[in-house]
Image (tube, grey):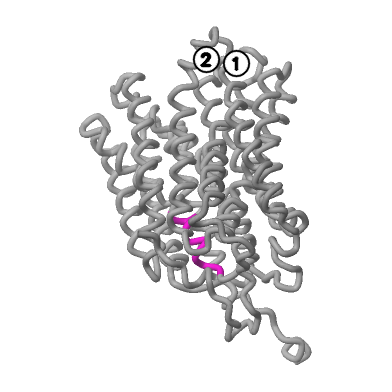
Amino acid sequence: MMAPMPPAADTTASPRTGARSQTERPSPASGTYSGWLFAVTIAVAAFNLRPVVTSLGPLLDQVRAGLGMNPTVAGLLTAVPSLCFGLFGFAAPAMARRVGPIAVVTAGMGAITAGVLARSFAGGTAVFLLLTALALAGVAVSNVLIPVVIKRYFPDRVGPMIGLYSMALSAGTSLAAAVTVPLTGALGGDWRYGLGIWAALGALALVLWVMIALVKRERGDRAGGPAADRLPITRSRTAWAMACFFGLQATGAYVAMGWLPKIFQDSGVDKGTSGVLLALTMVIGVPVSFVLPNLAARRGDQRLFVLVLGSCGIAGYAGLALAPATLSWVWAILVGLSNCAFPLVLTMIGLRARTAGGVVQLSAFAQGVGYLISIPGPILIGRIYQVTGEWYGPLGFLALLLVPQMLFGLRAAMARHIEDEAVRPKPAEVEA
């Protein structure tokens, strides 16, 4: 049973803003043949949003050797995704207002396909970094605008559609991390083929999105919200809470992806098993990412889910610190459940705005600021480990970060709308 979304369907004037909702339903896609095709198109796009990152990690040593990349530049690669997600994500609303979110996501799929394919032929480090940044730019704008597309074309199916999107994203993340190395071996052992093969899925997504763009034929201002309706979003406490919640959960997720195998290996777990445990951490997010948004959308607020996921993280990090080799699969599952704050925050972005334009702004603000917040996390964790030589300090720090994450999450999860908070002062009030 799909959850209705009253806020998404609200077409009455807000008592505080005096503005009529801009959540337009030009051609709701749910429940039709074209709707199913659109849903598949969104899922294929989501599947392509992480392989550009997770396919590189397992082959990083080979890439370094092949390009003559020094360790400092290789370390920079771990921070580039968050930086690009933040910076390019901020540009997404202006682009959507100009040509519409569907056209921008279509261009994003093109950037991902071109960047992933072309970087596999790069002859030097600088070109490789630039082409990786091109692909990440496509990921960034798609990160921001796919939830907006869902809000607009599936207004009464926001929870299930965010669930589908999150599940496909988690599946792409897990599959790229798990099969890139054996796939490279099957293709002759050259890292260029192992990275470039993922452009094939990008090309499929591009074809599907071109078809959708031709059918929908969006207009920019209508899709992104007219300039007069743009909110001073920095005045909204909910928007700031959402951004901080997003940034802190992203910190935990990137640390887990980057450091979890090392944590297990230092406790005596062999490399093969540590890789399986990392895969378990990511795979657990696939079914949860599908179910959680639907459950969250049924409730007036999502504070219960914020507390449950945060508590899973604290328990998982405590287990990793005290007995990492004992019940290691339990700690991996708990950390994976904690990382499911990602589909939860995506769901909340769709619920905390009344209008399509509001979702665009909130999505860009929360993800842009959030990813910038997440940049120092993995670097700081590595520094603490380097200084102490043990994992007690880094894991304790991660557990401690979950406290403000839950506090910001509790504020962001309250049943409020940014349009009611980001109120523009009336001219008379400005003069006074």
Decide: few, some or many residues near mark 2? Use Cα within 10 Å; few <14, some 14-19, many ≥20: some
Q: Do the CB atoms of the residues marked 1 and 2 lie less than 8 Å apart?
A: yes
The magenta segment is 344-353
Decide: few, some or many residues near mark 1? Use Cα within 10 Å; few <14, some 14-19, many ≥20: some
Tell me the kind of residue under disc 1: Tyr
Is the magenta region chiefly helix, strand or loop? helix
- Looking at the picture, tell me which residue is in the foreground, 55 or 327: 55
Q: Is residue 210 left or right of residue 410?
A: right
Q: Which corner quadrant of the image does residue 224 belong to?
A: bottom right
Label 2: element kind: helix
Q: Which comes before the other along the chain, label 1 or label 2?
A: 2
Residue 157 locus on image (x, y percent): 47, 59
Tell me the kind of residue under disc 2: Thr
Residue 81 locus on image (x, y percent): 60, 38
Q: Is residue 166 left or right of residue 367?
A: left
Label 1: element kind: helix
Q: Quadrant of the C terminus?
A: bottom right
Q: Residue furthest top?
A: 188
The relative height of residue 272 versus residue 219 in the rendered view (above or below) is above
346 magenta-colored:
yes
The relative height of residue 345 versus residue 352 in the rendered view (above or below) is above
Q: Residue furthest left?
A: 326
Q: Mark number for residue 184? A: 2
Residue at coordinates 60% horizontally, 49% vertically from top-left?
Answer: 372
Q: How many marks?
A: 2
The relative height of residue 404 versus residue 209 in the rendered view (above or below) is below
Residue with the mark numbered 1: 193
